[in-house]
Amino acid sequence: MHSLQTHFANFWKYRYLLQNLITRDFKLKYRRSVLGVAWSVLNPLLTCLVMFLVFDSIMRGLRGEGIPNFAAFLIIGQLLFNFFRESTTMAMESVLKNAPLLRKVYIPKYIFPMEKACFALVNCLFSFIALVIVFVLTWTPVTWATAWMAVYPLVMLFFFSLGIGLFLSAMYVFVRDIMHIWEVFCTLLVYASAIFYDPEALSGVMQRLIHINPMYWYITAFRRCVLWGQGLDATMLAVCFLCAALSMAVGILVFKKNQDKLVLYM
Amino acid sequence: MAQQQPIISVEHVSMRFNLAKEKHESLKEYFVALLHGGVRFDEFFALDDVCLDIMPGDFYGLIGLNGSGKSTLLKIISGVYKPSAGKVTVRGTIAPLIELGAGFDMDLTARENIYLNGTVLGYTPKYIDSKFEDIVEFSELRDFLDVPLKNYSSGMVARLAFAVATMTKPDILIADEILSVGDFLFQQKCEKRMAELMSGGTTVILVSHSIEQIERMCNKVAWLDHGRLRRNGPTAEVTAEYKNFEKPKD
């Protein structure tokens, strides 16, 4: 109990560092770009447009018939998956990238993966403007009574990604291959996350496979709140929570066990 | 008089590094090595059973040849490394004078870096606000505040780093050969600042290869040799012996 308290006090001391690092990343991301922060909105919007054109014309058969409001359906999946990929990939490299600093001063090392997850979340929140634009353009109705519940899957997804980010960032210091493996794995995951198709239309085996994927649950939970006006049922609440809790537990455990060794391998 | 407690006590500290014969940074390399008769590690003691007590107000110099474990000891004291054996107790706040520019982001301006680096050292933005003028004054960089650091000369970066690290009166200041950078005017300024901090009760640990500088500034010296503490005591005694030891090798 006491150690938990000191941990938290230690983190509290470094909250400004977290804040400063996020500001730095944000400034540097859009430095020397004419449109600046607008890219946070334009980028997902344009990517989505491309995917929409592909899946609404050439590959219409692939996505399954009968998804109403396909554009909105698509961009929700796209945005949430982007958040996941961005936060985990950036977190993975974060500890090693800050090696020059970590070799000189004592800073709690988890600050860096944590900062990347927060930074990705800030980006994701900005890109929700793209979501609003799509909803308005396609005149998709929103059920306000359930839309606010979307905060739940988003917060859970944040912790889910943070846990994975912590795990990856520690492992990446020892084994650099992880970056390539993770890149390929993410590509696989895109197709298994029901971003541009309706899994209910798939065969039983495929459906069950997709149900193993936590990303499917987060994306679907978000859609149920914002798009379909169904809100969250007990299963959704439980699965979203359990995946996040499990990921955090593994992430923290692995990170904590290795954090004193990390600096020797950088 | 009550017995004063040491501000830093280093008790039987050893630091063991596993020097892999080849460094395996990818799975393939690792498995290939594994097939060729296992992964071998050479054990290397950077520090071997070092005991050292530093009292409040000491100006401690660390001397020794390259690779004798000076920097490792500093890193253990400042918490970067965890010792493989032994214990370090630190009773106070530490301001590490980290090497040139570590903790600075070269793409950010000096103003932004002061805040970033200040928070790296654990200060609050409010506190940095209150010290901002001092920092600018000391580093003499007022005209360049909004220039990205990559356009600075290394001397300018060093000035900024020193100013940020000494913005407060820490209990312990750790300086690893920082004073060897910058022009002589700035070196004098740094020494003056360190003397000021000392008079305010700050304990300083200084690593330097310049015996002359150590003799001028320190009141006590510890001499490390191949990871062992060889001599430890008042400056004049230890440096005299150190010089005698070094000479025959020439």
Image (tube, helix red, strand yellow):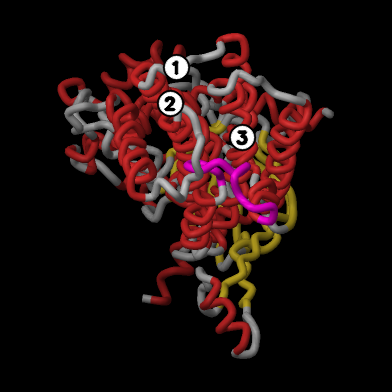
Q: Position of residue A218 (x, y in %)?
A: 61, 34
Please indicate whether residue A162 sits to the left or right of residue B64 in the image. Answer: right
Magenta highlight on residue B66: no
Q: Amino acid at mark 1?
A: Pro
Asked whether B41 or A254 is in front, the reply is: A254
- Dot 1 falls on a residue whose secondary structure is helix
Q: Which mark is residue A20?
A: 2
Q: Chain of mark 3?
A: A
Q: Residues within 10 Å of mark 3 (few under 14, many from 20)?
A: many
Quadrant of image for the N terminus of chain A? top right
Q: Which residue is mark 1?
A: B125
Asked whether A91 or A58 is in front, the reply is: A58
Q: Is residue A123 above or below residue A216?
A: above
Q: Amino acid at mark 2?
A: Asn
**Stretch of the chain drawn in magenta:** A193-205
- Viewer-side label of 3, 2: 3
Decide whether the magenta segment is chiefly helix, strand or loop.
loop
Q: Position of residue B76 (x, y in %)?
A: 60, 49
Q: Chain of mark 1?
A: B
Q: Is residue B132 above or below residue A18?
A: above
Q: Which residue is mark 3?
A: A218
Q: Chain of mark 2?
A: A
Dividing the picture into quarters, in which one does residue B144 lie? top left
